[in-house]
Image (tube, grey):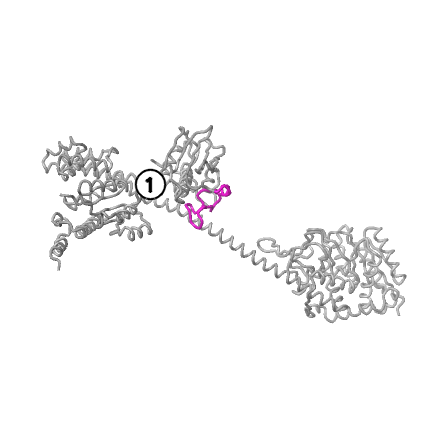
């Protein structure tokens, strides 16, 4: 069975592990991968695809060494392999212009400011992942408990009985 | 006809030769109708005049040598006048002096009626004598006019009569008669016409030569007449609270003092000769007379006056423009002051923030330490050891990609999810993973939690330490209590660079920064905080240059080296560089190559750097090496002068020097 993966892109180890720790409570059915730069994130994505896993959501910091988090999100938005990918910017330092670009050109789903509220982070990730599972027509069964179960079921049922 | 009354002309000069020559020439002119008395001083002249008048005689005209009186010609003139012995006597000054010091005073006091330049011509002297004699006699002793039939013709008398009558009737009539007649004549032509008309009306009044720097009219004084300037430049100045302001120089015009006459004879401006000036002093009386005698004088005067006013008006417009420019410069200066103030405020803000952040940062560090110890005490020894080991784990942490590779490797032997859990529990290779996999799920969970507690403590400690370093950097950046900072005998230059780099770390972004240490640097005498400020400014400048346009690959080199008696720091960037013609100005305040953009330090960064380096007796320069721009700072190991004595510069606050702890 392929894993549903959330990729956390953050260059500072302490911050990254804090994010990962906060997302660990999402449930065993959701795997959290880590990357420390845009290049590393691209590598991680290729690896998980190769392993047959499924990328559902990216949580990216804006300020990264080399290319920025917004650069990554814009690039992923253009990547036809991930039509239903959800994107969250988690940052303390994105200018107005960067944010506008992320929204317009990366179809940013959510913007979270540092320091983040862990409950809010989990809620946002859970909602967006639910969106993803619905839109990508994934079998909702493995995530009924961890994501928004009723919504997944409703979407599943609607799809099973097209009127 | 009273043939008995004695008529005496006076000649006053301390120099016998002048007296004699004047006496001789005057006697020749009067031809026995009058006698000529001579006196060596004003006092003698007054005594002589008093004697003549007490016996019923008249003293119509006195000729006073202006140049050689020991007390000064002007004083002699005024003394003679103030003596009161000769109230109606017309006083003519004879001078060859180029300095007119005091003439204005005499003119204003009414003591001076005419002027003859020495050496005089017979005609000049005659015309002066005729005019003054006629005026006096018509006014005070018309019955004696007949004695001078040979000298004064009917025309002279009539003119004198008119002058006297009109002066009595309307002494200020010049002002009432203004009826400007404008035509297209050139100013110069009108002026020369006026001079000619004045000559006709006043019998060629004397020209005087005024040497440069002579005050002709003093602002605020009573004006007794005007000057018609024939050649030379006269400057009109106004005294303000801020000193003398030049209002007119080229725009002065030919007639000086006329405007003052229009304002109740009070001089508006101070008139000073700039060059040699040739001028005709014309008293108010002479002016009135000239206008009466020759109506064209009035209209010419008006035209010259209007031309002069027009010139001054134009000058006034120019002054207005100058004023506008000055105002613009002033507002720019003000903006700079505001910018400087803002910069100072930034320093103060940093200091305040550093202070406020310092306590919580310290508390955080201590709290993390305490949590670690209490946790160890609380837990079973095995768990405590795991926590402790995880907390003590250092930088040998695998990278994210290594971690993913490890997971892949372990996942080949175990379930992918188990692999994740084994790594979480501390597996760092297949062997340790296999060992851990043998544990019960509970044990594994417990290990994972203990390990995570340890790494979390470690992360918290690192984060708190980072906050503390930033606070320290901020404190050394910010201004100290005395605003000057501390002089330190053993400044570690490398460390000040480290501090600066930490401060600008958030700006570095895509730029890669290389440290190149070519030599071990000896400690130097200086202010570490100030030096850190220099590096901060230079690095920020280089970062801006390197990211300025897309052309730069974005590398920055910080190079340190030792030279005999000096240390060298170079900051090198591969930005587009500074155009050669701007290199000179790059250290000036508010210089920025980014048009319209407020740059770091509000354009003061490099100038502050220069000031600080200068305070350290060092040098700072910029040069182009290939396609790279290099700022080079050289600092003496031991400063030649006492750095501590350097005054605080305006425009920036020297940062406080608390040595930054790394």
The image quadrant of residue B256 is: bottom right
The image quadrant of residue B480 is: top left
Residue B265, compared with residue B462, is above or below; it is below
Extreme-left residue of the structure: B440
Which range of residues does the magenta coloring cover? B579-606
Query: Residue B496 location, x and y as percent?
Result: 39, 36
**Can residue B480 be seen here?**
no
> Helix, strand, or loop for circle 1?
helix
- The quadrant of the rendering that contains the N terminus of chain A is top left
User: Magenta span has B551?
Assistant: no
Query: Could you tell me which chain the residue with mark 1 belongs to?
Result: B
Q: Badge 1: few (under 14), some or many (20 or more) residues near its Cα, within 10 Å?
A: many
User: Magenta span has B583?
Assistant: yes
- The quadrant of the rendering that contains the C terminus of chain A is bottom left
* Left-right relation of B235 to B200: left
The image quadrant of residue B55 is: bottom right
Residue B340, compared with residue B410, is above or below; it is below
Which residue is label 1 attached to?
Answer: B470
Query: Residue B22 location, x and y as percent?
Result: 84, 55
Residue nearer the viewer, B295 or B212: B295
* Left-right relation of B176 to B114: left
Q: Residue at x 74, y 64 (%)?
A: B285
């Amino acid at each position: 069975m392929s894993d549903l993966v959330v990729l956390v892109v953050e260059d500072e180890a302490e911050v990254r592990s804090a994010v990962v720790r906060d997302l660990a409570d999402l449930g065993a059915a959701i795997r959290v991968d880590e990357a420390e730069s845009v290049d590393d994130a691209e590598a991680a994505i290729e690896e998980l695809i190769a392993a047959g896993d499924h990328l559902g959501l990216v949580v990216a910091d804006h300020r990264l060494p080399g290319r920025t988090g917004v650069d990554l999100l814009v690039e992923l938005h253009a990547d036809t392999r991930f039509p239903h990918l959800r994107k969250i910017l988690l940052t303390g330092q994105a200018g107005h212009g960067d944010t506008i670009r992320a929204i317009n050109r990366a179809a940013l789903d959510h913007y979270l400011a540092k320091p983040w509220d862990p409950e809010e982070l989990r809620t946002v990730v859970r909602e967006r992942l639910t969106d993803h599972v619905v839109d990508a027509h994934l079998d909702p069964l493995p995530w009924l408990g961890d994501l928004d179960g009723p919504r997944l079921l409703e979407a599943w049922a609607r799809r099973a009985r097209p009127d | 006809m009273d043939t008995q009354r004695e008529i005496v002309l006076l000649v006053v000069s301390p120099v016998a030769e002048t007296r004699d020559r004047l006496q001789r020439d005057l006697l020749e002119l009067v031809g026995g109708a009058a006698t000529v008395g001579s006196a060596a001083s004003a006092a003698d002249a007054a005594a002589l005049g008093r004697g003549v008048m007490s016996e019923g005689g008249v003293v119509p005209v006195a000729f006073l040598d202006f140049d050689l009186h020991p007390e000064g010609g002007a004083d002699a003139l005024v003394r003679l006048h103030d003596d009161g012995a000769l109230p109606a006597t017309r006083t003519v000054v004879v001078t060859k002096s180029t300095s007119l010091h005091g003439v204005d005073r005499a003119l204003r006091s009414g003591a001076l009626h005419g002027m003859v330049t020495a050496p005089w011509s017979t005609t000049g002297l005659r015309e002066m004598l005729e005019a003054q004699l006629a005026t006096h006699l018509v006014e005070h002793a018309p019955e004696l006019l007949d004695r001078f039939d040979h000298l004064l013709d009917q025309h002279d008398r009539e003119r004198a009569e008119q002058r006297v009558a009109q002066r009595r009737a309307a002494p200020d009539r010049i002002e009432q008669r203004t009826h400007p007649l404008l035509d297209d004549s050139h100013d110069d032509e009108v002026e020369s016409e006026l001079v000619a008309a004045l000559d006709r009306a006043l019998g060629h009044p004397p020209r005087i030569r005024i040497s440069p720097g002579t005050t002709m009219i003093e602002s605020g004084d009573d004006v007794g007449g005007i000057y018609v300037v024939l050649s030379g430049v006269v400057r009109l100045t106004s005294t303000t609270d801020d000193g003398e302001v030049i209002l007119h120089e080229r725009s002065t015009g030919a007639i000086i003092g006329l405007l003052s006459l229009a304002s109740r004879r009070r001089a508006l401006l101070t008139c000073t000769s700039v060059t040699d000036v040739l001028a005709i002093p014309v008293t108010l009386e002479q002016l009135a007379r000239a206008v009466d005698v020759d109506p064209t004088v009035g209209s010419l005067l008006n035209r010259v006056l209007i031309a002069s006013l027009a010139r001054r008006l134009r000058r006034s417009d120019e002054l207005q423009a100058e004023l506008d420019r000055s105002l613009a410069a002033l507002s720019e200066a003000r903006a700079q002051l505001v910018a400087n103030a803002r910069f100072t405020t930034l320093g103060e803000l940093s200091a305040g923030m550093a202070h406020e952040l310092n306590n919580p940062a310290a508390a955080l560090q201590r709290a993390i330490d305490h949590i670690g110890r209490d946790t160890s005490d609380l837990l079973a020894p095995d768990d405590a050891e795991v926590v402790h080991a995880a907390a003590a784990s250092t930088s040998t942490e695998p990278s994210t990609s290594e971690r993913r590779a490890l997971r892949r490797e372990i996942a080949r032997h175990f379930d992918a999810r188990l692999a994740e859990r084994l790594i979480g529990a501390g597996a760092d290779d297949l062997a340790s993973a296999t060992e851990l996999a043998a544990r019960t799920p509970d044990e594994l969970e417990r290990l994972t939690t203990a390990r995570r507690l340890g790494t979390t403590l470690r992360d918290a400690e690192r984060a708190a330490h980072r906050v503390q370093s930033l606070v320290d950097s901020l404190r050394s950046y910010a201004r100290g209590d005395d605003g000057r900072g501390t002089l330190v005998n053993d400044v570690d230059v490398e460390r000040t660079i480290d501090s600066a780099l930490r401060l600008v770390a958030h700006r570095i972004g895509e730029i890669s920064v290389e440290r190149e240490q070519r030599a071990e640097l000896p400690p130097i005498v200086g202010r570490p905080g100030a030096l850190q400020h220099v590096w901060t400014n230079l690095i920020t400048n280089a970062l801006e240059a390197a990211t300025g346009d897309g052309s730069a690959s974005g590398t920055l080199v910080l190079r340190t080296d030792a030279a005999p008696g000096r240390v060298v720091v170079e900051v090198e960037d591969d930005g587009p560089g500074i155009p050669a013609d701007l290199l000179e100005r790059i250290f000036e305040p508010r210089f920025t190559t980014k048009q319209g953009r407020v740059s770091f330090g509000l354009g003061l960064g490099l100038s502050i750097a220069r000031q600080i380096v200068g305070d350290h007796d060092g040098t700072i320069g910029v040069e182009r090496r290939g396609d790279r721009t290099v700022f080079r700072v050289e600092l003496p190991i031991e400063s030649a002068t006492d750095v501590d004595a350097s005054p605080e510069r305006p425009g920036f606050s020297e940062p406080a020097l608390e040595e930054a702890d790394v």
